[in-house]
Image: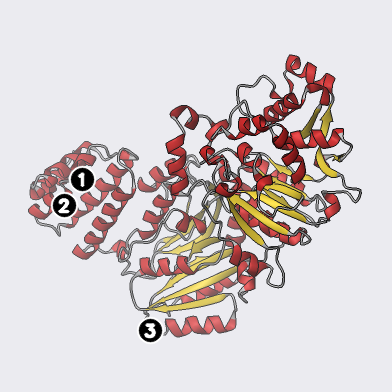
Amino acid sequence: MKIDAVITWVDGDDPRHKAKREKYGDSTIASRDDVAGTTRFRSVGEILYCVASLNRFAPWLNKIYIVTDEQDPKIDERIKELFPEKHIPMEIVDHKIIFEGYEEYLPTFNSISIESMTWRIPGLSEHFIEFNDDLILAAPTTPEDFFTEDGKVVCYGKRYGALDLFTAPLLGHHDCNSKLVTFRKMMYNAANILGKRNGLIRLYHTPKALRRSIYEEFFTEHPEHLLGNIRHRFRHTEQYNVQVVQYIMLYNRGLCQLRRAYSQLLYMNSMATDDYVSERLAQFSQQPNHKFGCFNSIDQMSEWGQRQTIEWIERRIGMPNRATTEGEAPAPKISVIVAVYNAEAYLDKCMHSILSQTFTDFEVLLIDDGSTDSSGAMCDNYAKQDSRIRVIHQSNGGVARARQTGIENARGEYSIHADPDDLMLPTQLEVLHRKAIESHADMVICDFYKQRARGTKRSKQKPTTLSAANIIDELLNGKLHGPLWNKLIRTSLYSKYNISFVPGLNYCEDLLVCVKLLLNHIRVAYVAEALYHYNMIVNDNSITRNYSREKLELRLTFLHHLFEAIPAGKHERSKGNIATAVAYQCLQWGVLTDEEYAEIFGEYKKYFKKSHFNIKRKTALQLSANGHQTLARRFIKKKG
């Protein structure tokens, strides 16, 4: 028996498709999620997993047809890569082909209409299986899972008799009276078309085994029912499920075998919370023999939920890690990035602390930023001794450029930075990674030890709340610190939100990146343990402890990029605090003339009054910003 597969798919983010929807959909249609919700058209790559699963678990299929609207998912090369020896032939079928003779009803944005026409695919076999792109095969299948040896179609559903259908409207079952376009209402409408005496076949989100000739027979006899379905460009309550029509017809002829859907179906509901995703994936893993998977509206999950779901699907259908196919080791869980510049005096201790971690699934990226001492050679020597270490040598460009190089080359799911004059405590990676997994966090913050000449003190970094907005305020107000060495961060966020280190900004470059990440409302967790040792006395020439015109210019550059990153009207008090702090430092240092000070801080003076500084300092800063820097210094020296 020759069996084809048909997959209906569209990429709703395609600008051309969006333009069509906007042209043909009025405001009433656009506002209805049941009719034109964006999730009905959005694609996050599910079509690749659907096709890959067919090749993996149904290699006996004759051909795969992808039905779409002037689009191409461009998955051919990836499928050939995954199945180099043999893969199922695949063909793109445009809506114009199956709507030939009915072009007036195009374009259509209605899966119910499209499913009414798939049987018209040229060359389609008599027996075919219909998939939506959110369906996968999850275990090996045989043709008998869809069509029995004695010629019956296998339907994963349940039958309701005539009495059930007569009482359903009274009891509110099957969404009979719903004013929304629901899956169950479309099935109920199908039963009405054939007459309630024939009963109803209740379908679930499984692949549908169908026969082309049954559709041809029905629509030849009832062309009005074909037109009734395809005339609606968007879903409509008058429409009906054509698959239910076919199954009722086949059942009444003794040609349909019913099987329980959930004996084979792994179903993930739409708009799933992270807890639900975690729970369902754990359940699915306990059901290795279930043959069908439906992952409804992956695009509406959180980033964590999407990633966990897609990774589970890839494992289930045996898609190898990309790194493995390219001959590299599988990607590590964590990338530790160390920006190295003339650090020969203390790099050994730092590296020993990293390589002594209790958590071992990590890589170390040593970015030699044009060192003129033996640091570069030391880095190469480390790499020879431990395969987890990679070294990148580059001309000197400053710590921001070195950190950016590290992020661009990081392969870990999470990343963290370490400074070569500091130490990581042995359990830092283990504790932070465990917390990230437990709480589904994008960023995990921990306490640290701060070493000064007069002793070492623990610096607590517990946010007042874990909301990203609150943490931004506490970073800018100085309650929390901005370094990246006490923060484990999901690496993909940098590319997802187009966040990079500003070249040449070698002051607070890490704080700026933290703020940019948090502006995207990422999920944050906190660990009440000091896991990093910050050495403040090794490098006495640190930029944070020198006062010069050059350092001032870096502070002003940071301030400019910070205000550019934060939307107008957001975090105004915090912006006022940090602008006031920089302005006050400049006033104390005295490296600017009155004219320069007024020109630079004229645009920031409106923020001075919003800060938490006392009236005396605010007054001094207003005087300075108005060109009276000498008077301002005298003012702040006054007692009282």
As drawn, is 329 to the left or to the right of 148? left
Amino acid found under the numbered disc labelled 1: Tyr
- Position in image of residue 602 (x %, y %): 15, 46
Above or below, 172 relative to 13: above
Q: Position of residue 302 (x, y in %)?
A: 56, 45
Q: Secondary structure at mark 3?
A: loop
Say what amino acid the circle numbered 3 marks: Asp
- Whether residue 131 appears in this view of the structure is yes
User: Within 10 Å of the Cα at label 1, are there few (<14), some (14-19), or many (20+) other Cα atoms?
Assistant: some
Q: Residue at x 46, y 85 (%)?
A: 377
Element at label 1:
loop
Which badge, 2 or 3, comes first in the chain's sequence?
A: 3
Q: Which residue matches tag 2?
A: 600
Q: Which mark is residue 604?
A: 1
Describe the element under mark 2 as helix, strand or loop. helix
| Residue at the spot of label 3 | 373
Assign the C terminus to one quadrant of the image.
Answer: top left
Count every numbered label the image shows and give the total. 3
629 vs 206, nearest the viewer: 206
